[in-house]
Structure formats: C-alpha cells, structure tokens
Image: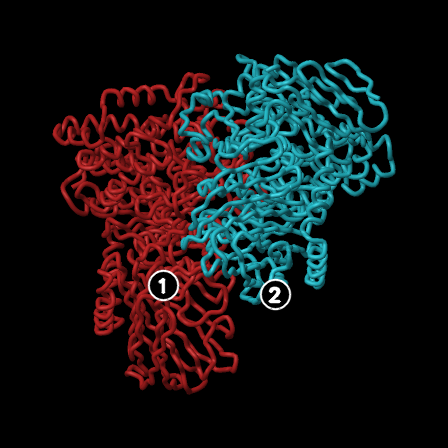
Chain colours: A cyan, B red
Amino acid sequence: MKQYLKQDEWKIIEEGLNPHYNQISESVFSLGNGRMGQRANFEEDYSGETLQGSYVAGVYYPDKTRVGWWKNGYPEYFAKVLNAPSWINIKLKVENQRLDLATCTVENFVRVLDMKTGLLQRSFVATLPGGKKVAVDAKRFCSMADGEIGAIRYQVTALNFSGEISIELSVDADVVNKDSNYDEKFWNEVYKEAQTGSAIVTAETRKTLFHVTTAMTYAIHSGGKPAAIKVGENMREKYADNVVQTEIKQDIPLVIFKYAAVLSSENHAKDKLVEHARAKLTEALTAGFDSLFEQHAKVWAHKWEECDITIDGDIAAQQGIRFNIFQLTQTYTGEDERLNIGPKGFTGEKYGGSTYWDTEAYCLPFFLSTAEEKVARNLLVYRYKHLPKAIENAQKLGFTGGAAFYPFVTMNGEECHNEWEITFEEIHRTSAMAYAMRDYVDYTGDQHYFTEFGLEVLIGIARFWEQRVNWSSDKNKYVILGVTGPNEYENNVNNNWYTNYLGAWTLRFAQQAINYVKGHDAKRYAEIVAKTNFNEKAETEKWKHISDNMYYPYDTRRKVILQQDGFLDKELIRAADLKPEFRPLNQKWSWDRILRSCFIKQADVLQGIFLFEDDFDLETIRKNFDFYEPMTVHESSLSPCVHVILASKLGYKEQAYQFYLRTARLDLDDYNNDTEEGCHITSMAGTWMSVVKGFGGMRVRDGKLHFTPFIPDQWKSYSFRVEFRGRVLKVKVSNEKTETILEHGEPLEVMMHGKPVLLK
Amino acid sequence: MKQYLKQDEWKIIEEGLNPHYNQISESVFSLGNGRMGQRANFEEDYSGETLQGSYVAGVYYPDKTRVGWWKNGYPEYFAKVLNAPSWINIKLKVENQRLDLATCTVENFVRVLDMKTGLLQRSFVATLPGGKKVAVDAKRFCSMADGEIGAIRYQVTALNFSGEISIELSVDADVVNKDSNYDEKFWNEVYKEAQTGSAIVTAETRKTLFHVTTAMTYAIHSGGKPAAIKVGENMREKYADNVVQTEIKQDIPLVIFKYAAVLSSENHAKDKLVEHARAKLTEALTAGFDSLFEQHAKVWAHKWEECDITIDGDIAAQQGIRFNIFQLTQTYTGEDERLNIGPKGFTGEKYGGSTYWDTEAYCLPFFLSTAEEKVARNLLVYRYKHLPKAIENAQKLGFTGGAAFYPFVTMNGEECHNEWEITFEEIHRTSAMAYAMRDYVDYTGDQHYFTEFGLEVLIGIARFWEQRVNWSSDKNKYVILGVTGPNEYENNVNNNWYTNYLGAWTLRFAQQAINYVKGHDAKRYAEIVAKTNFNEKAETEKWKHISDNMYYPYDTRRKVILQQDGFLDKELIRAADLKPEFRPLNQKWSWDRILRSCFIKQADVLQGIFLFEDDFDLETIRKNFDFYEPMTVHESSLSPCVHVILASKLGYKEQAYQFYLRTARLDLDDYNNDTEEGCHITSMAGTWMSVVKGFGGMRVRDGKLHFTPFIPDQWKSYSFRVEFRGRVLKVKVSNEKTETILEHGEPLEVMMHGKPVLLK
C-alpha cells in the first residue's frame, strides 16, 4: 500500500516527481474515451522507468508463442492487447540539450488528473544539465466528444535564457509491447507521410491485419501569436515527424498545440483511413484546443450528471468512488456493441484479452443503473452474437449437441487464453452470462429479451452443465469434478460449492425462460426449438433431475457451506495472522503453497451467497461470512466489493467501510502492488456496487426497488442516482434521514427498509 | 499402433519408403554412443517430412520464453535439448539434378538397423526426374569405441548412364530446433574453415555458451580405387563444405567415406577444440571405415555379452527386448558421471531436459544388474552433487532449514521445467532419490554409501516431507495436499496414496540410515550433523510422529487403496470400453476431460505396491490390480512394465505377456502415436525389468537373490544375465526347467521359487 497521491474530491494530484512510482502514476492518470486510451506517459523524452502505452479499442494480436507442454484443446493463440502507435510525443531540445526529466533537476513537479473534465495536467520547472531553466505546463485529453481525437496544449517558458529551441512532433508506430517475447514488434508499416504541418503513419498489426492511422498536426504560439518557425520533415520506418525550430524568449510562454487523429479499420474502410484522418486533423486544428476541450468537458458533465456519487465528510472515499466511476466511464461508453470492457481498460497491457466474466458479474449492474437500458442490453447481445463461437468452443473440449461454453477471455468470441486450470476449468463463467440475463430482466422487466435472444443462449449453457456434471454412485448425487471457482487460489477442485450452485440454478433458470417464451410467443419458441434442435421433454427432465440432486459440500459441525470437497483438510489460519512479508501471496509464495493454503483470493462461497442472497437466511449468511472472511486475502480486485455488500447487510459497518476503502482506493493506494501494470477497471464497477448495493442496500425484488441504506460513521452524507424503468431516482443518505427523490419519470413505489414509499 | 516394420531377432527392418512414417523411422533407427546421437535422417537432400536431429550429450539451451501467466517460484528457464550441427550431409547432384527421395521415383528402399553391431544401413534405387537411375547403399554408425567419431560409407552406382556427379560434403551449424518459437536459432558461429579435404565449424550455444566443433573429412573411391575428383570449398554463416565433382561410370560403384568428429567444450578446452578435431579426423581417415567399424562392433559385442536377453520362439518379443536394450545402451554408457539419461535420449527434442525421476525409478535397476557397480553408484552420486541445488530449489518454494526438493527436470541440478502441477506438485520425485538408494544398497550391500553420501541427501529429503505435510484436524492425521502423483492424469489432488506412502516411508528410511551411520562411523556422523545443522532428537521425533500418523485413503467397501481423496466420485469406466477414436486420450481429449475421468496414465497405486511389494499380501495386491488395471490407459511409457511385474506375480500370464509386448514394442509399433518425436528411452529399462523382475521374478531380499520364473505360453525359452555382488549369473528358463548358471565369481546361494539353491 502506498499513499503518495494527494486527496481531493475531484482531482488526483501527485506533487513532486516520484521516478520510483512513475509507472503507477502512468496507470492512475490514464486517459481514455471508449475508442482509444493513453497512459500518462510524458510528452517529452524520458529515460527513466516507464511503461509506454497507447491503446486502440478492439485492436489486438494473437500470440502463438508456446512454452512448456501444450495441452490438447488449447486455443490457437493467447491474445495480447497491443501498445499502439504513439501520438503524444513532443520532444524538446533546448540549444541541443534534450529535455528529459530523468537527467534534469526538477522542481515544482505536479501532475493532476481533473476527473470532472477528463483533463490531465502536468507542470514542472526543469534545469537542464547546462543550467538553463524551463517551466512546462502541459494539458491533454482524449476527446469524449469525438473518440478519434486527442489534443495537447504544451507550454514552455524559458526562465533564465533566450535561445533556440527544437520541437520534435511525431507519430510513431515503431513501438513495442512490454510483454513481447524476443522483443518482437507487432506493427508493420503500411503508409507514411511527413508534410510541413502534419505527419501520418498507417500501421498494420501482424496476423490480425488491423490498420490504425495515427496522424498529427499542430500550431505553435509565442506570446499569444503564431510563432516564427522553421520546419523539417523526417521519416523513418513506421515513423513520421516535423521538427520545428524556433526562438524561445525569456519569460514569454511558447505554446505548442498538438492535435492527433487515431483511426482504426474497425471504423473506416482501410483505403479511406488516411483521407479521413486528414479531415479530422483539419477539423481539430480549425476548432482549436479550447473549443475541443469545451465539447469534451460537456460530455463529461453529462456523464457525471448520470452516475456521480457524492460522499460528504470523507475526501478519501469521495475521491475513490469518483476515480472508479471516471475510469469505468472512459473505458466503455456503451455505444459500440462490438466492444466490451477489458480488465485493465486502456491503462495497461495485462490480461491481454478484452472480455472476461467481469463484465457480466460486476460491470452490468453499474450500466443497468447509470445508463439507458440499451447499454446493458448491448452487453448481453454481445454474448448472444458469440453463441456460435461458444458452441464451437465447447465442441473443442468434447461437448456435443449445442452445449455452449463461453470463453474465459475473448476478443471475438473465441477463447484466447491458455492456462488449463482457467481456460478449461473455471467453468462458472459460462453461467455468468445466464446470471447477467437474470439481472437484466429483473432490473428492466424486459422478459422479451428471453424471446429475442436469451433463450437460445440459456439452452446452450444448460446443455453444457448437463454434460459437465457426473453421477457419483459414492455420494448418490450429481457432482462436478475438476473445476476452478471464482477463488482462483484453488485449482482443479471437486465440487466447488459456487460452481455446483450456479450450475444447478442455471438449469432451473433455463426452464423458467422456456416457460416464458412458450407462453408468450409459441411461434418464436417453435423456431428456437427447431434452430437448437431442442428435445424439450428429455432435456428438461434431465436438467430437473440434476438440479434436484446436486451435491453441495457442507460442514455439519460448523454449519457452514464448504468451498469445495476437502477444504477442511487445510490448516485454517486467519489472513491477519500471516506475516506481512508474505503479502501479497501471489508475489511472495509459490503456486503450490498458495493452493494448499486456506487463503482465498476472492470471495467464492460469499460470491454465491451474494448472487443468490434471497436463498439464505441471515444466520446462514453470517456464519459463512464469519468463517470465510478472515481467510480472504482479497488479491483479486473483484473481491472486496462483495464483502462490503455482505458486511453491510450483516450490520458490520466498520468492516464494510474498510472493504469499501480497499475497493475504492485499490489503485490510488496500490493495495495489491500491481497498479504499475494498469488499473483494475472492471472491479471499479464493484466499487459503485459497494455504495449502491452495500451502503444503500439497493435490490430489485419482484420488479420493485428496495433500499436499506445506512451510513458509515466516517461520512456525513452520501448520495447516488439510479435509472430504473424510465425513472431517475436520487437517493441521499445522511445520519438523520434518507431522501429519495424522483428526478424524472412516472410515480414509483419503492421499498425503504421494507416499507413501501410512493415517489412522485 | 502401426506395424510397418519387419520383425527380426537382431535387426529392425523397413521395406519400402514410407514418407508418412518417415519421422517415426527417423526416431526408431536413431544411433548414439553416449556422447552424441543422430536421428536416422537421410544423408542426401530430402524435401519430405523430416525431423532433423543431431544431439551432443550435455549441450542445452535455457529458453526464457514466457506465455500465459508466470507463477511465482517458476524457474528462470525451460531447458531445450538442442539440435546440434549436422555432420551427416552427403548431398548429390547428378548432372545438376538433386537426389531427393521426395521427388524421385524410389524402388527397393530398405532401411535396416543392425542392433548387434550398431549399424544403420539404407539402400534404394532412385530414378531422377530425367530418367537417370542410381542405386545407393549407405551405412553409418556413431562409434561406441570413440564417442566423438561418426562414420558413413555411402555407395552410389549409376545404373543407366555415365556422367558428372557433384557431392556436397558439409558440416552445418545453421540448424533449427523444431520447438523453437519465432524460428529462433540457438547457435552462433565461433570459427569455420573449409580446406581441400576437410571442413570444420565451431558453434557456440546462445546463453549457455557451450562450444561444439563439428569437423569432417572424406575419401572417395571408384571401383575400389581413389577417384579422380575436383574439389571446391565453400563457406557461409555457420557452414563449411567441400563440393566434389567427379565422373560416375555406369555400373561402377562410387564409394564416399565421410568421417566426422564431434567435440564439445564439456570435454575439451575451448581453445583446443579445433586442434583436437583435426587430430580426430586424421585418426579416422587413417584407420578407415572398416577398421573403425570393427572397433565399434567389438564394443557392442561386449555390451551384448553383459546385457542381452534372448527369447526363443517369439521374434516380436525378441526384437522388442533387444531394441530396448540397444537404445538404452547407446544412450548412457555410465562412463561420465556428469551425464544422465534423458527420456528421449538422442532420438528427439522432446522433454527438453536431461534428467527425470525415470533414471532412479526405472533405469537404475537395469544398470545395477548389467554393469559394474560404479555405474549405478555414479547415478546416485550425480544426485548427491546436486544436493545444494535441491536445497536451493526447496528454498525458492518457501521450504527452510536444509529441506531438499529435487527438480523434476534438470540439466545441472536446477529445476528447468515450468508447469506448476508438475514442477511444484509432482513431489514424489524427490523421494525417488531415496528409493534409488534403497535399491542400490539392497542390491549391492554397500551400506557405506549412506556414510559417504546418502545420509546427507536423506536428511534433506526427510526435511522436505516434514514441511510438506500438514495436520488435518478434520481427519486427525497428517495429510499431503495439492500434489500430482506418478499418474499425471490427475493434478493438484489431495492425499495421493502413492505420495503419502512414499513420504512416510522416506521418513522411516532416513532414520534407518541415521542408525547405520551412527553405529558405524560416529565421526562422520558428527560431521554430517554439523554440516546439515541436524537436530536429531527433535527432527526424528517429528518424522516418526508423521510416519506413524499418516493418512492413507482407502475404500472400505471394495477393500482397495484409493488413488487419492475423491477418486470414487468419478465414473468408473473400463479403458477397454472407451471408443477407439478417443485414444490416445492425451491427443484426443482436452485436459479437463482427462483430469475428471478415472483413466490412469501410469500405474499410481500399483507403482507404490510394486515399490513396496513386501508390505502387501497377495490378496491386497490382487484386489488393487483388478481394480486399477482396467482403468489404466498406459499413455506413459513408464506404465506397462509395472503391470507386467505385478501381473506376473499374480499369475496373470497372458496379461503379463500383452503388457510386455506393449512396453517392448512401444516405439517399434508406435503404440502411443508419438514415436515420431523420439523413442521412449527411459522406459526401455522398464522393458528389461519386465523380463527379469516380471517373468523371471527376480527380487533381492536380505541380501539374497530370489527368482520365481515362469514362461509366457508364446515362448519356447528365454534367458537373461545379471551381475550381483561380484558374480555373473545366467538364468535360462524354458517350459521344462530353469537353469541358473554361475558364469563368474564365488559360489552363491539364491532362492528359486522360495527354496535355496547353491550355485557354484
């Protein structure tokens, strides 16, 4: 845990240059707009430690590198998010000396991310090795108003000299991935040009052949007027620039405006990319920085209007929740149904894939409550479109008859992760697609989704479970062998309770969807039966037999659910009793030691109780929480939010608050010592849930919103806003009272602490 | 299973060119001599499918390629056996047309491996695209008399023309590994020369910096006399050759003698390699092919004298056993204590490492009985020398206080395999070192080995087990969680019976060694105590408590040992009932499906019963054999031999015979569909055990040899020879009688079917 960032309600602030923490800051201060993203790398040269990262949504590389034993059934490739061509470079030479913060003396360094407007600012005074001093003030943003535009305002002031300055403004596709083996590069050059005033490079990804055109133009002002400049154009492989020479006069700010257009063949015909990029540049240059920024800030204002959470009396908590909402919002805008939410968003290379079950289990509730219905629906349809690939994926693993096994990591519906204990065994994820449907239908009331898309998916998933269980004649029950649960610190276990429970539930849920579709649209039902070759009677009878006879491990002595068979053979130790030098376990312990320990990476039994809360009485929830919570190390970013919600329900106020801080400030305080690799984007939705479902106690039951709010002792008040079936509600909770205001829409009855309240 | 090879007592014969099986033949017909090895690649060009393989003992490359998630505790690298510079090339152009069997019409193709003399022969008639016909007869061997020499006699006869022929004789270090990612090459050039009459290349392995000098010289005869030739020398990167032009006259054989010297920096100073190689060439050229071959064949005659097994009346069985003994003998000669026995020997790249537990568990008994005592002792000392690395290895995984965890795969004592379920969890291998000691001491009576080397190793291993168990308060026993047993078709299981049994036994065995050393050499004992910082009382008390209170899974209903906890949850299906298209499972099923099935790759409970046979009554052995054997798919080459031995003991004669064929002809008949990757060298020792311990029933108990021979119905008689404590015995078994002849040494009492027999 590190606490070097300053707390503020709307801003993330780093004061002083921290070379040692630079890669963490590069993650935390990242910018994005749903189409592109950029780590907070410096514009100028930096020879210190840095993870350069520029990302374009949907652009990836399938790495086929093999090492160790290849398991039959592994996918062809392991997807890598690609570090895309760089557009931010503004490299300065002051009378032939490079401005490089690793070699200069640096004073007054401040980096600020203004979350309200999505603006990254940086200012410092640097003394070059020869003694020349410059003050720099840099601002940039990735436009939320136009996802293909980035803009930089970079102001340099000579503090103790006048002289010659050279400014290299480039677009550069000669970039590497940190995770590439053999320093392999993943981009080939397709086109480049460097003209006076602009530079363009189109690069193509190897194998996947995506084209990305990166273009830049600029304007340079001195003392508020266009500066007299001399321009040289340069090109080398995958690179084009303008090198501008100009005079810098002491105390007169020189301002460089750099405008970038980043266009991908996902959105333009390949042969139009350069033409469209040129048009974008003209547009940007004509509008200018201030006007572009104004449009951008307007979109942010609207976003905050929809999803802001306020917390009064606790700046750390307020900053944390806004940081989470900010990052989530700039990662996924819900506008493009081909896109999804990568675990690191646009903040790092790790988790090379785009889509995990995180989306369904953690992100969906956020979008359900803070955006129009179609955003959540798009996320479901994304998986519907992948159904044929999920069926193929199941076939590769030996399943038959239309069973659907959704991939653990995917770019286009195909599995693209190869680690047998996850790829083959973390099977609960396929039912995350079913659970998301339940969440969606419960929240929106849109049961028609079953008819249109949902049922086909559910039949596929149910068929998967039917084949994945087996009858144990020893237990006289159905068992599920060889799985990895959400707690990935156990691999290849038998009868993971969460998995068994979710599997059995899915079989029942599929029946429910069948009943609905059959009852509401017999023609469409017949169509689905024909399309899926569905033998209703035989299949559903089998499903019922399985869900009625599923085995669930249980400890009769302690009266707790058992995470899996054999769990009680472990030494049951509290995480609090672990030596601090052992944490985080995944960086300090070998894998076998983690596996045979009792320590839980992420809520597993508790995750199941969270999802199916109404199936359990409070006493059961308490017993299980009290048993498992102390063994949970929360080394998955997805863990603490579930604990906030259950602790809140159990009235463990202080614990709930502590878990909240952990999830809300996970990246800001670098709890898991891994923020340098990128921020934990998908779990940020869990932070939102912590407030709304945890402290606010929001649930949907039988089409009605329920709230059981309480307020952590550290707070004066908090508020959140949710959209629900055409209404917008604002809930404001203080120690004295809870106000629920219907901001928009028809009157609505909600349940407050179990009592109906009519909102008008 | 394929049966395209002809059966013969002493020869492996392939008639007709089988391009589709060529890579299998390249494995089966491999040659070696303990220092170098060569797959049966063609000397001339071949554009068909081939796995080029030339190997130099002890030369490897540490691959750091990473893919997927890296687990903390993984070793730095994954070792790769390197395809070494090629010395066999004799590329022919007949009037500018390349001789390439993939593009010629080929008749009368015959490939023969004469196991008696270690000679590979190949003959064929090829019609070149233009109609010219040549007959080729090629012979080659890797000298067993001088491990650094290879020799080829390559005879070409023009059948329907006279004309110009060009012969390219090269040494070529510009070679690739099949398993290299990104086509990376692992050799750099250090030195090369091409002079008239010879060519030399010294290449260096990347990272490991081994130097290998490959040199060649030649003589060319026409009609028995030196031919008139024109020589051109060529060099390119990592390559040097002589291209010889000569006339070939119809029906007059042209004979090319190529002599190669292959020297490695493991055996010569780097700066002397070229000089020594030149001397070798001169030596070889002076001696000539016939004389070199005579010396080579003499060594083979002596080897066969030591270890031949004869089987009368069953050519398939006879050919099988000789093939196994042949390959094993040419892989490891026991002369160099730095070397060991790789699972594929010199026949392929796979299993990138050199040493597995195979050596201790399977190969040691062969060398104990067929070679002087020091060969087996060298194998033990090899591991003694690695003890510090085994302690380091344990430390990396969090063990402390001198615990020793031997690597699963190693080149120099360090672990060099990264697959968590094996590397971290297949922990039984560390006790294979202890069991080998027991085997050795039982067989030789050399208890002094404990004093000199053994005890230190045993203390280290015992400490490992002490820390690896944990107390289960649920079971009130010690348990061992998260392991992989010898049956690698189960991963990360709890309480694998074999592992628990072996662990507990090791703790008792260590005590036995302590008692011996203490009683026989108090001074040395004190030295060991000091060196290992051994707290005898506390540590041995703990060991006793663990071995007295170890948990062993057991099925009280069936009265069988359970392979691991939870085994009875599986569907228990007979392997015989599996659809044939599912076999081999590891090529047809995804890993999860294999894991949750009951199918056993390799004897696991049965392996334990085999090792600790005297701990079990016959009824127990029978029950377990009858339970587990039907579920065993024998997809490890190490599996069938154990089944031969137990089936023999149980009187299951026909089954024993069938298992025998499977182990003996595993590669000849390609049972597991993987011989193209190389032969299963280490399991070949298991074939030997099948005859001697299986059919011959040989055991050592209390320093005495026991035999309970029987003869399979298919055989008329069989015989084997064993060395035992200074004697050489020959055992000859026929339907009528068993003859045991003391061929050498003092009189010896042996037990024959439980009755003492004095041999004089």
- Nearer the observer: mark 2 or 1; the answer is 2
Label 1 resides on the chain identified as: B
Side (left or right) of B366 relative to A640: left
Report x, y in % for residue A565.
53, 24
- Residue B80 or B498: which is nearer the viewer? B80
Q: Which of the labelled discs sits on residue B339, or is there none?
A: none
**Amino acid type at image mark 2:** Lys
Report x, y in % for residue B9.
36, 57
Crowd tier of the residue under label 1, counting other residues whose Cα lies within 10 Å: few below 14, some 14–19, many 20 or above: some
Examine the rendered structure and indicate whether residue A500 appears above or below residue A340. Answer: above
Q: Which of the labelled discs sits on residue B188, or is there none?
A: 1
Q: Examine the rendering and report whether any part of residue B115 can be seen.
A: no
Q: Quadrant of the C terminus of chain A?
A: top right
Side (left or right) of B57 relative to A381: left
- Residue A222 or B552: which is nearer the viewer? A222
Q: Which residue is mark 2?
A: A192
Q: Residue at 26%, 59% (x, y): give it.
A: B265
Report x, y in % for residue B550.
37, 22
Mark 1 lies on a secondary structure that is strand
- The answer as to whether the residues below labels 2 and 1 share one chain is no
Q: Examine the rendering and report whether any part of residue A267 can be seen.
A: yes
